[in-house]
Amino acid sequence: YGSRKDVVLQLLVPIYGTKQAANCFYETFVEKAVRNSDVYQRSKAEPCLYFAWIDGRLVIFVSWIDDFMILGHPQDVARVKRDISSAFVSQDEGSLLEYVGVKCDFKRGADGIGTMKVTQPVLVQKLKDAVGESSRKYKTPAMAGLELVRGDDSGAIVDPKQIFQYRSLTAVNMYVMQWSRPEIYNATRGQSRMMQKPQPTHMNALKRLCHYVVGTPNRGLVLHPDRAWDGSKKHKFHINGRTDSNYAANTDDRRSVSGGTTYLESCPVIFRSATQKFVTLSVTEAETAAGVTCAQDMMYVYRILVSLGLSVELPMILEIDNKGAVDMANNWSVGGRTRHMEVRMHFLRELKDQGLLIVKHIAGEDNETDIFTKNTPSSVFLKHIPKYVGYDEYMEGKDNTA
């Protein structure tokens, strides 16, 4: 059209890569594969999870845009593949060795219980290309007790090139922590708060975090249930959670940090380290807020299993290492300094009254979610991370760093 600027193009199909394109594919898939099917159903708790019971066997498949992961008996998996291929032009990638950039290593023991290890070697290599390898082998992702602060406008700010690198590397670590490296969650959370004006101190802490990840390339999330599923709907799955908090840890705004893990058959299926969205007025309130967040995660996992037609052992167990929070969740008393906590306390209390949840106390030294609320010494860190990454070759030898 040359120099004309008054031309508007109407797109007849969505352009690949846009949010509209993803949503268009999702709606088309649901319409063709689920709504018009008398076999497949969509989970009411998770809209990207689909399932079917075929001859008493459960087959499930999940969608990440247009990438599908199918799990079940080989005969049922083959049927799902045929049905999807009949509705869409598709490509079979074979066995589950990788899914959207995540490497999956699976093995089954003599007892019939499988173990899956999840890693992201491509992203680890990306960090290595950016920061290289360190001569020091760090045992922890951050110095013990380190709490990054924003500082003021008079503080030294890194140059624009380093700012770009800081944001890029932090983004990579954020993606890694979500899917394969839960033990770096707290350190990465601290780094992500400094995106706007990173200072040299923040950059040094980020480089140490990257060197830790690069120095432990084979470490990854390990999912190893403590028992095998018999394949029936009568099997009662176990869900439990543990939480911790670090009161007023962020000195910039005095927000507390919540940490929590939700376990399904002893596998950490949800884990988080997050700055609380509000200022809490006591340690008990901060611990309660963390407990409520974990209870929400537990209810989400519970509803997914129920939506699949499966059973869950009730009540579920939530463990908190603060006796004040435990006591308030298990009775209906109101104290002078806790009257403002009505909504959050009532949520835990009502779950307890409904028989869905029991809140118990756990000793702080036995609570692995401690590593999600603060940067701990290596002795504490190495004690707790096997819950998430198992035991690997990097846990041998002496620690040569603070």
Image (cartoon, helix red, strand yellow):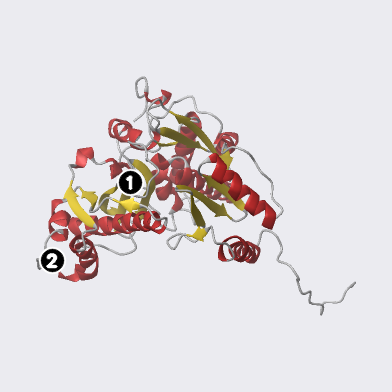
Residue at the location (81% across, 80% down)? 6
| Label 1 packing within 10 angstroms: few (<14), some (14-19), many (20+) | few
The answer to whether 347 appears left or right of 33 in the picture is left
Q: Residues within 10 Å of mark 2 (few under 14, many from 20)?
A: few
User: Looking at this rendering, what residue extends furthest in the right direction?
Assistant: 2
Q: Nearer the viewer, mark 1 or mark 2?
A: 1
State the SS at label 1: loop
Q: Considering only order in the chain, which callout, 2 or 1, is on the residue closer to the N terminus?
A: 1
- Residue 170 higher or lower than 12, as above or below: above
| Amino acid at pointer 1 | His
Relative vertical location of residue 10 with respect to residue 194 in this rendering, above or below: below
Which residue is rendered at x = 55% and y = 40% of the image?
74
Q: Contact, CB < 8 Å: mark 1 with mark 2?
A: no
- In the image, 187 versus 324, the foreground residue is 324
Q: Which mark is residue 40?
A: none
Asked if one can make out residue 315 in the rendered structure from this viewpoint, the answer is: yes
Residue 337, label in figure: 2
Where does residue 172 sit, x and y in percent of width and height? Answer: 53, 45
Q: Which element carries disc 2, helix, strand or loop? A: loop
Q: Residue at the far front: name it.
A: 55
Q: Residue furthest bottom?
A: 6
Q: Which residue type does callout 2 highlight? A: Arg
Q: CA gap, disc 1 to disc 2?
A: 43 Å
- What residue did someone put label 1 on? 235
Left or right: 115, with 278 as reference point: right
Residue 107 spot, x, y in % from top left: 47, 30
The answer to whether residue 102 is visible is no
Residue 294, percent across and down? Answer: 31, 54
| Residue shown at the point (31%, 49%) measured from the top left | 260
Lateral position of residue 362 relative to residue 241, left or right: left
